[in-house]
Image (spheres, rainbow, N blue to C red):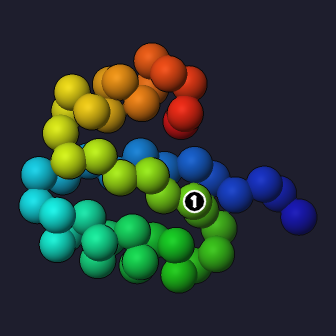
Amino acid sequence: MSPPLLVLYVDDEPSLLDIGKIYLERSGICNVTVAESGFTALELLKEGKI
């Protein structure tokens, strides 16, 4: 079995982040990390967490 896809989902609406994460992970083929801003997303990328 292939390792899961790593997905970075960025949105400034916290409720959409929750729903989107649940929906995407339901398939079982990806792990989703969420960020509420582009700045936060870039920091996660720089830190190598994604």
Front-most of residues 3 and 43: 43
* x 53%, y 36%: residue: 50
In the image: residue 18, left or right of residue 49? left
Count of numbered circles in the view: 1
* x 41%, y 46%: residue: 8
* x 63%, y 53%: residue: 5
- Which image quadrant for residue 14? bottom left
Residue marked by disc 1: 31
Q: Where is residue 31 in the image (x, y as percent from the top left)?
A: 57, 59
User: Amino acid type of disc 1?
Assistant: Asn
Residue that protrudes farthest toward the right in the picture: 1
Q: Position of residue 3 (x, y in %)?
A: 78, 54
Residue that protrudes farthest toward the top in the picture: 46
- Which image quadrant for residue 19? bottom left
Crowding around mark 1 (Cα neighbors within 10 Å: few <14, some 14 to 19, many 20+) is: some
Front-most of residues 42 and 27: 42
Quadrant containing the N terminus is bottom right
Residue 41 position (above or below residue 17): above
Residue 31 position (above or below residue 7): below
Q: Where is residue 36 in the image (x, y as percent from the top left)?
A: 20, 47
* x 32%, y 34%: residue: 41
Front-most of residues 24 and 45: 45
Helix, strand or loop at disc 1? Answer: strand
Residue 23 position (above or below residue 42): below
